Amino acid sequence: MTGRWQVRYPSAWFFVVLLIAQSQHLLNARAQDTSSRPINHLAANPPRLIVQIVVDQLRGDMLTRYHDRFEAGGFRLLMDQGLWYTDAHHPQAATQTAVGHATLATGAFPSRHGIVANNWYDPKTHAFREAVADPSTSVVGDPSKKGSSPVSLMTTTFSDELTISTDHRSKIFAVSVKDRGAIPLAGHTGKAYWFSDTSGRFVTSTYYEKSYPAWVNRWNEQDRSGSWAGKTWAPLRDLSTYLYADQPPYAPNLFDYGSSFPHPFGVNNAKDAYYPKLMVSYVGDELTLDFAEALIDKELLGRNSVPDYLGISFSSNDLVGHFFTDTSPEAEDVLLRLDHDLALLFEFIDKQPGLGLQNTLIVLSGDHGIAEVPAYLQHLGVPTGTVDQKAFLAKINDSLRTRYKRGDLLAGYSTPYLYLDHSLIAAAGLQLEEVVQTAAKAAMSVDGVYLAQPTSQLAETSLTDAGLIERIQRNQYPARSGDIYVVEDPQWQMGGAATGGEISIVDHGSPWDYDSFVPVLFGGMALPAERISRPIATTDIAATLAGRVGTKLPSGNSGVELPEVTATQPAPQR
C-alpha cells in the first residue's frame, strides 16, 4: 500500500498544482479581458449611462406650477423635450422617503421589498430602527459611528440586475444628502455616498469599502461645505415675483435661522447647527451636484463597454418643505435653484468625451409628495386639522390601562403603524387580537383619524374604500409592519415631534393623492418629446429601465414597461 501511494501521490499533486495554475491563468485572463469582451445579450443600442434622479418631496403638480419660471436646460429639458408622464402615483399606502426610494429602485411594493416605513419597531431589541441602519457596519474613517447599508432591502434593484447581467462590469453608484436616499438606488451591488451633517463630508459605510478612493478624499479635503460659513441664504430672484411671497411664515426661528428670508448659516460649529442649516437650504443640492459630477469624471461613468448607472437623490426640496412648507418662498427658491443645478448636470454629461446626452438615459421622479400645512388650508376654509401625537398615544394607553390594568402594552408608534408589545401581551395571558381591537377602537375615537385598521384583518374590514385597503395591503411585510395601520383624515397631519428627531411642521406619508402624486420624466437617448396623461405607477420605472437595457426584471417587480421608452430607438452616436 505504501509503495503504491508513493507512486501515485506525486501524480495527484501534480494535477492539483496544474489545475490551480490553469485556474489562475483563466482568472488573470478574465481580469485583463473583462472590460473589452462584448456583451451581446443586452437590448439593441443600450445607453452608455443610466442616470436615475429622485427629487425628494416633488409632488407632481410642482413642475406645472413653476414651468414658466424654469430655464430651458433643467426640468424643461425633460418636460418639453422628453417623455413626461403627468399622472404617476406611488401604489403603496406609506409615502415616505425610504419607502419611495425603495419602490423606485426595485419596481416592487413594500410587501415585497420590505421597506415599509422610514422606521419600524424591532421586537428583538424592543426599539425602533431606521430603514437603512446596519449596526454591523460603521462609517468609513470613523469607527465610532454606526453605518448604513441595504441589508433590509429584500429584493433586487434595477441596478443589481444590471450588475448581474454584465457580470459586475457595470459601474453602479448613488449619491444623496440622505443615506436612505442613496442606498436603495445603489442596491446591494453598487456603492452609495451620503452627506454627514456632523463632518460636512460625503461618507459611506464599511458595507461598501474599507477606505475611500483618492478622489473622494481629495473632494472632502477641499472642505466645500465650509464655504457658506458666515453667509446667508437670500432669494435667487426678486422676492416679490415669488408665487407665495405674501404668505405669512410658518417656520419657527430655530438656531437663529429665521422664519423668513434672509437665513443666516452662521459659523461652522455644532452649537450653531451649521451643517443642518446647509441641508435645510439649497446648499444640500449644490453639494450633491458637485460630488456627483466629480464621481462621473473620476470614475469615468459612461465610458465603459457596458452600461453604467448613477442614482442621484436631491433632498433639499424635502427638508425645506418640511421646515418652511411647500407654499413658501423658500420652497419655490430651492426648486428654482435645483432647476439650475439640473441644467448644469445635463450640460456636464453632454460635454463628457465619448458620452453626451445622446448616449445617456435619464429618468426623473419623486419619492413622494406633500400636503399643505393646516394653517394655510384653514385660512382658505379647507377642512383640515392636526392630530396631537402625544394625546393620541395617551388615549390609546389609557384605554388599554383601563381594560387590562397594564400601561405598557403599546410598544410605540412610527408613521403609519401602531405597534403592540406581543411578548408582554402573551406573558399577561391576554389575547393579542382582542388587545389590538381595543387599541384600534381607541385610536378611531380621536378627531382627525380616518382609519385605524388592524393589519391582521385588512381583508375583513367594513370600509368600502377598496382602493385604500389595497394600498395598505401593498405595504404589509409581516416581520416589520405594525399591528394597526393609521390613516389621518384628508388634509390632516399627525402633529408633534417627528419620529427620528427631524424638525417638521408639515409631513407626508399618507395614501392620499397629494402624497402619492409624483412626476415621471424620461430624457436623453434621442427619445421623442411627448406629454402622456395615461395613469402609470412608479413601479413601472424599474421595469422600463430593465426593458430598455435588456436585463431581467428585479426579483420583486410588479411594474410594467412603458412602451414609449422601450420602443426601438436609433443607434446613439459613439
Image (cartoon, rainbow, N blue to C red):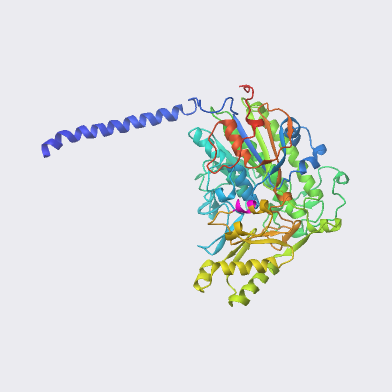
Question: Residue 54 in the image: x percent, y percent?
Answer: 66, 42
Residue 222 locus on image (x, y percent): 64, 42
Q: Is residue 3 above or below residue 117?
A: above
Query: Is residue 438 rendered to the left or right of residue 378?
Result: left
Answer with left or right where residue 415 lies relative to residue 36: right
Residue 174 in the image: above or below residue 403: above
Say if the magenta span includes residue 2. Answer: no
Relative image position of residue 283 (x, y in whole percent):
71, 46
Give, as a single range, the part of the protein colored magenta. 470-475
Looking at the image, which is closer to me, 101 or 461?
461
Q: Is residue 488 visible?
A: yes
Q: Position of residue 356 (x, y in %)?
A: 65, 27
Query: Does residue 276 appear to the left or right of 210 in the view shown?
Result: right
The answer to which quarter of the image holds residue 217 is: top right
Q: Quadrant of residue 375?
A: bottom right
464 versus 11 height, above or below: below
Quarter that holds the C terminus = top right
Can you see residue 193?
A: no
